[in-house]
Amino acid sequence: MLITHQHPHNKSMMVSVIGKPNAGKSTLINTMLGQDLSIVSPLPQTTRNHFHCTMTIDRTEIVFVDTPGVHRSNKELNLRMNQEAEFSLEGADAALLLVDSNRINEEDFEVFKEVFHNNEFVGPVWLVFTKKDLSESKVQSEQLTHFKEKLKKTIPSLQAKFFWISTVNEDNINELTAALLDNAAPGAHLYPKGDISNKNIRFFV
């Protein structure tokens, strides 16, 4: 069906960004948007709701869904924040799972397993290892591959390729951006008037 009020060659993709606290979710989104929209803080759990951040390149719109950091906890607030991450998968076309490559551990595996346990998400899932500038001398690519293969047994839609990025020197950011643009499908833009979020200024303040 033709897009009656938009250019017929428009493409769009909604991407849920999921990871433990301080994995670099908001920093990645800000880097890709080219502006500080999503809050960044060394304090964990700064983001407490999922919300949209939009990047448009040519006729392709990528809508990132920023989410609270997921972690294992029985506290009511933390359980609610984990649910926010799960809810972000509803309507998403793809998911980015962010892991701090300095601190890969069993909890990363367990929280991703928990997020995907109760839903039937079938879109592509990409593993993104962050903070490459801090970890390159400490982490070998074999470790990243081992973690991906283990996670693949829990999340069948996890893609074969993973990304190892740095937002400090923007290493492999263009590669990740290109992959998202290539996977966007023909469709109407959710924010055709140039809005960069579904939240207003008061929310960000």
Image: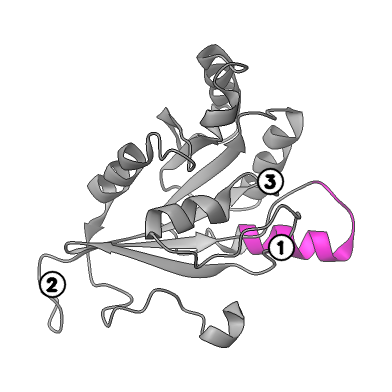
Answer whether residue 106 is visible to the viewer in this image: yes
Q: Nearer the viewer, residue 21 or 11?
A: 21
Q: Nearer the viewer, residue 161 or 43?
A: 43
Mark 1 and mark 2 residues within 8 Å of each other at the beta carbon: no
Amino acid on which disc 3 is placed: Lys
The mark that comes first in sequence, 1 or 2, is 2
The mark that comes first in sequence, 2 or 3, is 2
Q: Which residue is mark 2?
A: 1
Compared with 22, 99 (above or below) is above
Mark 2 and mark 3 residues within 8 Å of each other at the beta carbon: no
- Is most of the magenta stretch helix, strand or loop? helix
Mark in front: 1 vs 3: 1
Image coloring type: one colour
Instruction: Please provide percent x and percent y for residue 109.
Output: 68, 33
Q: Secondary structure at mark 1?
A: loop
Q: Which residue is mark 3?
A: 20
Q: CA distance from mark 1 to mark 2?
A: 42 Å
- The residue positioned 73% from the left and 28% from the top of the image is 105
Q: CA distance from mark 1 to mark 3?
A: 12 Å
Q: Which residue is mark 1?
A: 46
Instruction: Please provide percent x and percent y for residue 111.
Output: 71, 42
Q: Which residues are magenta?
A: 72-85
Amino acid on which disc 1 is placed: Thr
Instruction: Please provide percent x and percent y for residue 194.
Output: 29, 78
